[in-house]
Amino acid sequence: MNNTLSTSTKKIYCFDTSAFVTLSRTSENIINIPEELWNHLDEMVKDGGIISHRTVFEEIVSKSKKPDLVSAWLLDKEKYFRNKTQFQIDTVLKIISNFPDLIDSESEHEQADPWIIALAIEKTGEDPLFGEKKVAVVSQENKRSTKKMPAVCEFFRTEHLSLRDFFQEIGLGIKLIKNKEE
């Protein structure tokens, strides 16, 4: 028996509101996302492969009596959304000082974008117990914008992925099957 510990790379995906909302809108308005895919995402959330921030949870989960698909899916996952830390607070200040247009300063509500990036930066800096850890922000924001999350991630040397990139990277896709007429 070999007693050496193998090193592995664990990738953590920090989901932004736009990624969750796009999944919901796709499933509600375009094509039903198969239950198996939702189940896989559930498992990734539970094992820490997908994380997000409390501000994202608050942006998505409405207090209405009839939550939409993604709100309903996230309701029992609140404990997996990370709270603010002092490191994140300090990092958000740096993010906003470099990219003031990332948020709407007129908004009365806290905005998740800088918190997601700060969470990713924080997670990147943590020492993994075994192996290497990589972190990526997942959002559906425009990669060509100089004011949005992809530009901020690039500035802070944090990987950014679209949902398409995310699904490709984890090896998940949807196989289309034409329904037979009866």
Image (cartoon, rainbow, N blue to C red):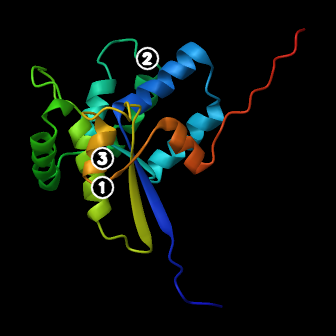
Q: CA distance from mark 3 to mark 1?
A: 6 Å
Q: Which residue is mark 1?
A: 157
| The N terminus - image quarter | bottom right
Frontmost of labels 3 and 2 is 3
Q: Residue at x 54, y 37 (%)?
A: 164
Kind of residue indicated by mark 3: Cys
Q: Residue at x 65, y 29 (%)?
A: 34
Earlier residue among tags 2 and 1: 2
- Rendered image quadrant of residue 62: top left
Name above or below for residue 181 compared with residue 26. Answer: above
Quick check: marks 3 and 1 in contact, CB under 8 Å?
A: no
Q: Which residue is mark 3?
A: 153
Kind of residue indicated by mark 1: Arg
Quick check: marks 3 and 2 in contact, CB under 8 Å?
A: no
In the image shown, does 94 or 98 lie closer to the viewer?
98
What crowding class fits label 2: few (fewer than 14 Cα within 10 Å), some (14-19), or many (20 or more)?
some
Earlier residue among tags 3 and 2: 2
- Report x, y in % for residue 5: 52, 83
Q: Which residue is mark 2?
A: 68
Looking at the image, residue 45 sits to the left or right of residue 126; the answer is: right
